[in-house]
Image (cartoon, rainbow, N blue to C red):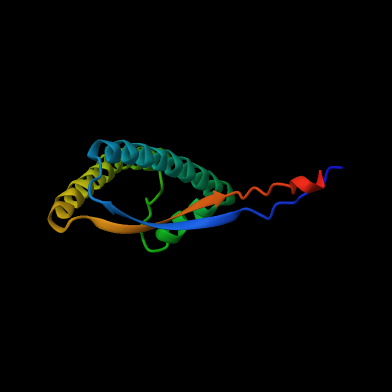
Amino acid sequence: MPTNVSSPAPRHRVRKVTRVIRDLDVWSVFKVAAVFHAALYVVLLITGVLLWNVGSATGTINNLESFFASFGWDSFSFKGGELFQSSALFGLFAIIGGTGIWVLAAVVFNLITELVGGIRVTVLEEEVVARTVEADPTQR
């Protein structure tokens, strides 16, 4: 007659491990930074276009133009196409600049860690240990 033997829930063993970060691969940092900044560029351009369309549809752009005209700027007006082109050009330079800053930061990090030995990080590694319980052979 078979008996159901329920095994207790698996235990988690936690092991504390210390790691040292001494080097960042500059090429990897460059690739990640370029993709990140390009994605941010696209998101911000789309957001700008959507906000411009909402502002234009609700009359906010015209209200701002008339507000500035009340100060004596009679010929003041926003030109959406020029703003978009300027933002797009600025964004391209921002991609190059931001990526360059990340790469420069990685190089400086590598130089500093050569002097001081790196950054120590403590990581907790969990291991699931499943205990097996065998049925008593006399109860078979």
Q: Quadrant of the N terminus?
A: top right
Is residue 48 in sight in this rendering?
A: yes
Closer to us: 31 or 40: 31
- Compare residues 136 and 5 and report the one nearer the observer: 136
- Residue in the image at 40% along x and 49% along y: 77
**For residue 71, above or below residue 56:** below
Residue 82 visible in the snapshot: no
Residue drawn at (26%, 57%) of the image: 119
- Residue nearest the observer in this picture, 53 or 13: 13
- Residue 65 image offset from top left, x and y in percent: 44, 54
Q: Is residue 79 left or right of residue 92?
A: right
Total numbered labels = 0
Q: Residue at x 29, y 37 (%)?
A: 28
Relative height, residue 112 to residue 85 (above, below): below
Quadrant assignment, res 120: bottom left
Q: Position of residue 104 (x, y in %)?
A: 19, 46
Q: In this view, which residue lies farthest toward the right?
A: 1
Q: Position of residue 72 (x, y in %)?
A: 36, 61
Which one is in front, 34 or 91? 34
Farthest residue, direction front: 138
Quarter of the image for the C terminus: give it: top right
Which residue is at the far bottom?
71
Q: Give how far across and how far down residue 101 sits, in percent.
A: 23, 47
- Determine the image quadrant of residue 84: top left
Q: In the rendered image of this protein, does residue 12 appear above or below residue 40? A: below
* Residue at x 34% of width, y 39% of height: 32
